[in-house]
Image (cartoon, coloured by chain):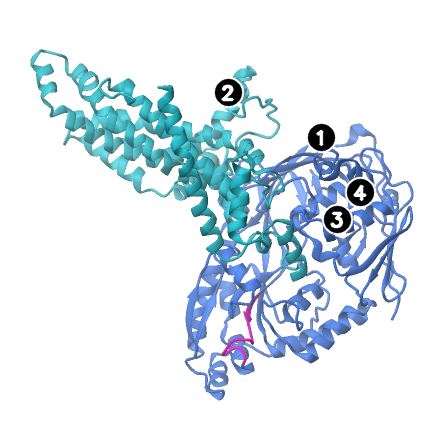
Amino acid sequence: MRKSTLSSLSVAALAATAAPLAAQDYTDARVAIATTETISGYNPYADPVVLMGSVWCQVYGCVTRYDFDAGEFIPYLAESVRAIDELTWEITLPEGLTRHNGDPVLAADIVHSIDYMANNPGSGKSFLVSDWASVEAIDDLTVHITTQTPDATVPDNLAGVQVTSKALFDELGDDMFRQAPYGAGPYKLVEVSIGQHMIIERDDAHPMTAQNNPAQIMYRIMPEPEQRVTALANGEVQIAQGVPPQLMQRVRDLPNADIATTNSVEMMFLAMSPNTHPWDVHEARQAVVHAINREAIVRAILQDQATILHGPVSEGQIGFDPDFTTPFEYDPAKARALLQSVDLEGVEVTLSTPVGRYTADRQIAEAMVPMLEEAGFTVTLDTPEWATLWANVQQGNVPFYYMGRGSMIDPSRALHQYFATGGSPRIGFSNAELDELLGAERSEFDPEQRAQKMQAAIRTLVDQAPAAFMWQHQMGWGVSNDISFQPRPADRADGWEIFVN
Amino acid sequence: MLLYFIKRLAGAVPVLIVVSGIIFALMQLAPGDAVTMLISDEASEADKARIREAWGLDRPPFIQFLNFLGNALTGDFGMSFRYKMPVIEIVLERLPATIELAVAATLIAVGVGVPLGVLAAARPGTAWDAIASAFSFAGISMPNFWLGILLILFFAGYLNILPSGGREPWGLGVESVTGFLIIDSILAGRWDALGAALKHLALPAIVLGTNMTGIITQMTRAQVLDALREDFVMTARSKGVSEARVLWRHAFRNAMVGVVTIIGLEFGTLLSGAMIVETVFAWPGIGSLLINGISSRDFPLIIGLVLVYTGMFIVMNLLIDLFYTLIDPRIRMN
């Protein structure tokens, strides 16, 4: 196994590329972003929502971040993050790194942050760090993380670790989040209005900010897509997150804005739990994959705003193989033949789907029903309230459902969770060969080797078909002509990637 | 009068306990809990169990309820699982926005519905009556969320004269004294802020008040028509009293008891409608907060908010009872 070192695009290196400008050169323009997410409060660890997590990373700074251009995790606050042996990762902080109040950022802060995330009831993100055996400050600038087994996903997990101050926490406890939210990120926290908005302000002294990044950014909750688009049209906001396919043309027609799309990196799939009949029969699961005309659904319902999946990942994600195509093309006759071969023609199944959780989820599930029936299934459509469905899915009580799974730039955690033996009850799938392949990719630190092992695991997964992989939505962002912003895969709108024209 | 008040308020306590018990039981019957909804789906079962314990969700439901009741009697409604803040603090922060919206909607409903209903009753069977009926039935039958989106598209999108949502523009900078933005703007002498606040209030208040307007119009029409057929109206007319005076002074005043009763009852419907309207307009009140609470199974927040809603409904009806004595001297508090 090779030792892995993340490329050292550190804060110090950024300082060299972003030449400091005089204060008067910095724009004082403000940008409002209409978001669909929740704003739960001041605690950066409370809510696992992706977009807000990235906002908190802008304030506090996270240990790593994903570089979408380079296609790898790179240090963010850290100077370097590297594996020094199979079980130990070393984080080194740059010298002289300070918070917005001038306090130094120390190794003890990282240890404290990870400990809070793992053990405090106020944390909703314990899953990122709770499997680690130990986290230790070696000196003021060095942290060692020891994992229980070789784990190549540590840099991915560290991208969700906001580094808050141990000294301030010792002094103020949880009140620190509200009274002293001093981070070391490129933006400072100005205001949080729970359930409404959050305002951050550019730190001109930070090496990641440029003169034409917005002086202030407001992330403003607007749950209704019509409202987001209208607010973009009349200039109330400059960026509108989550423009659904049916409103994209309207945004394109606006004189003051345009649409920008990006891959959601969220696999949409039909899960089939082998713990229930008929999904315990391999041929029945394969019949489902053959039965769904994904091209027709993407064209007619999603208006081509989706990327059809041949496995759980697409281009840009770890483990994507451009040469791999699913062996389960749309073929209702073959699907029916498969069902007939195992004497299951006419078998009754219930397809559960959330409503309003994902783009056109109900319409998509309604379109799937006749497709499945053409293949020989007798289908009942179930559309429970999201909280009810989600609770039942997590307990393994839903045999057949349409669902999405995000945060899959590195798909390892998701694949283990859904498809490894004991990963979770939500599908309850178990296959020794797949377990071995997933274990192998998780413990491989060399990126190329790991990608190959991931691809092998994905091929086995697709063949076993505990899920029918459907598509990844193209996420539409409305962007005002007053700014330049190219959205990245996964929901995020970072200030340093927004430029005032 | 004071004794009457105290009696009525004391009578509300068992109502609040029963309501909280029903809500708690319903929450227990619903699948899932706050841990399922608020903790990442990647959390391990061990992590979830640890958080359940920390939040007290591992205890028997009856014990959880007794704990809640005991604390609630001291004014402590617990901590919100989602917002990690005392429920009472969150509710008090958001309550003024809902009251402001509800009052504005009620004023619109009364201001439009009462004159329209009187007009229809004064000219039954005419075009005015038909227009008033059509308007009121449209108001009653139109779904809030649909009308809201329609008005956003027209006034914010097409005409661009009103904001699409929210309670205030970014950077309004009015110091919060009462929490009521309109009052705070007046107190600060900030007429620009008052204008901005009213512009933000206009669409959600119109949408919220539309249904109530329809009902008040119909109710006023029916009550005034009844009153106009009474003997005392005939007497007044025979004495030569002007038709306007007959209508407003004699018929309408007698019809008001029924109209006011409906306003009180409809206030509850209006509050439930506020949940949808607040969500559509991103209005930062307790209605949208309750929707978020339900979707995340945030039990303390849900019960706290339902109790606030119940309390508001009780107080509103108490005020209506007091109002009866003003409009009809025959009614006494005893």
Pointer 1 and pointer 3 on the same chain: yes
Say what secondary structure mark 1 lies in: loop
- Magenta residues, start to end: A269-280
**Amino acid type assigned to the residue bearing label 4 in the image:** Met
**Amino acid type assigned to the residue bearing label 3 in the image:** Tyr
- Cβ atoms under marks 1 and 2 closer than 8 Å: no
Q: Residue A208 carries which label?
A: 4
Whole-percent x and y of residue A453? 76, 74
Q: In which quarter of the image is the C terminus of chain B?
A: top left
Return the residue found at the far top. B240
Front disc: 1 or 3: 3
Q: Mark 1 points at which residue?
A: A28
* Viewer-side residue, B309 vs B330: B330
Q: Is residue A156 left or right of residue B93?
A: right
- Cβ atoms under marks 1 and 3 closer than 8 Å: no
Give the CA separation, mark 1 to mark 2. Answer: 31 Å
Q: Name the residue under label 2.
A: B183
Residue in the image at 38% along x and 20% along y: B2
Front disc: 4 or 2: 2
Label 1: how many residues lie within 10 Å, few (<14), some (14-19) or many (20+)?
some
Label 4: how many residues lie within 10 Å, few (<14), some (14-19) or many (20+)?
many
The mark nearer the N terminus, 4 or 1, is: 1
| Marker count (numbered) | 4
Q: Does the magenta stretch include residue A484?
A: no
Label 3: how many residues lie within 10 Å, few (<14), some (14-19) or many (20+)?
some
Identify the chain of the residue marked 2, using the numbered disc in the image: B
**Amino acid type assigned to the residue bearing label 2 in the image:** Ile
Return the residue found at the far left. B238
Say what secondary structure mark 4 lies in: loop
Which chain did the renderer colour blue?
A: A
Front disc: 1 or 2: 2
